[in-house]
Amino acid sequence: MMELPLNVDFTGKVVVITGAGGILCGTMAKAFAQAGAKVAALDLNGDSVKKLSDEIRGEGFVCEGYAVSVLEQEALEEVRSQIREDLGPCDILINGAGGNNPRATTDNEYHHEAQQGQKTFFDLDADGVDFVFKLNFQGTLLPSKVFAGDMVERKSGNILNISSMNAYIPLTKIPAYSAAKAAVSNFTQWLATHFAGTGIRCNAIAPGFLVSNQNRSLLFQEDGTPTARSEKILSGTPMGRFVESEELLGAVFFLCCEEAASAITGVVLPIDAGFAAYSGV
């Protein structure tokens, strides 16, 4: 079991987490379960959430895994019905599904440095860009549409979206992902306003640079040494290191705790080891 950052009791709460097959949201699922919640772990990869739920249940906590695409509303509705039967109605929704795609990424930071055969801005695949926008934005909007219904019925609940530091200032090479996360931040504020009179709060966290399965090859060579991009990141981060997935938990617990954050809604909280605070000089 992990050491939890805050002594928050989520006993009886049903927490639905999308993207739970990944490192970040898998860690959140373990933490919420350890804090007493009944966790519904959702991911496109059914094997990954089954493994996660088996691990959590093996430690004596409550977790059920569900294979579903966050881009299919009808499938999400079916899973919602199953969760209500298995665990109860949703109290807290963590919209963690998202990611980038190579088809929406350039090979160079600056166009004038592009060499023959490299993918430039003009070579970006329209379908790839569309996929990234759908996965991050629609993949946040659709689960919110489905599971917020449980919260409206009981006039209480929390929605926590996962934005990114590149929603504030776009990172080079990944224009679609940066723009899509900016849309998630904007949607967080819209949703907070829309549901303000229903007892539902909606916030987001904006993680800085973490090492995950998606970006490991961009940050480290095969021998484990940092890539040039990784060195640039660390040199621009005052704390001089990457953020660990466990370091998101304090903010997640705080924002989802009614007693601690009852008047906080529409906030996007950076967790970035100081990256956004540093001008570079």
Image (cartoon, rainbow, N blue to C red):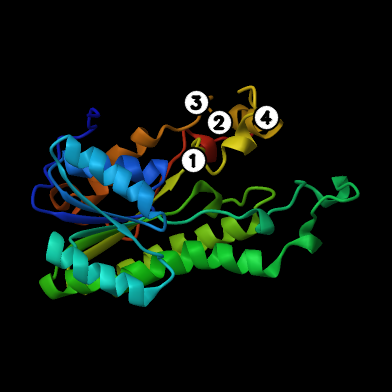
Report the mark closest to the observer, 3 or 1: 1
Q: Secondary structure at mark 3?
A: loop
| Residue found at the far right of this picture | 116
Distance from Cα at disc 3 to Cα at disc 4: 18 Å
Q: Quadrant of residue 125?
A: bottom right
Distance from Cα at disc 2 to Cα at disc 4: 15 Å
- Amino acid, disc 3: Met
Instruction: Measuring from the top left, give residue 209's x and y in whole percent.
Output: 51, 38
Q: Secondary structure at mark 4?
A: loop
Report the mark closest to the observer, 3 or 4: 4
Query: Which of 127/276 is in front?
Result: 127
Kindly identify which residue carries mark 1: 208
Distance from Cα at disc 3 to Cα at disc 2: 6 Å
Q: Are marks 1 and 2 in contact (CB under 8 Å)?
A: yes
Q: Are marks 1 and 4 in contact (CB under 8 Å)?
A: no
Mark 1 vs mark 4: which is more N-terminal?
1
Distance from Cα at disc 1 to Cα at disc 4: 17 Å
Say which mark, if any, is on residue 175: none
Report the mark closest to the observer, 1 or 2: 1
Q: Which residue: 18% across, 36% down? A: 58
Say which mark, if any, is on residue 227: 4
User: Looking at the picture, does residue 37 appear above or below residue 140?
Assistant: above
Q: Is residue 207 visible?
A: yes
Q: Secondary structure at mark 2?
A: loop
Report the mark closest to the observer, 1 or 4: 4
Q: Residues within 10 Å of mark 3 (few under 14, many from 20)?
A: few
Mark 3 vs mark 1: which is more N-terminal?
1
Q: Are marks 3 and 2 in contact (CB under 8 Å)?
A: yes
Q: Which residue: 34% across, 72% down? A: 75
Distance from Cα at disc 1 to Cα at disc 2: 9 Å
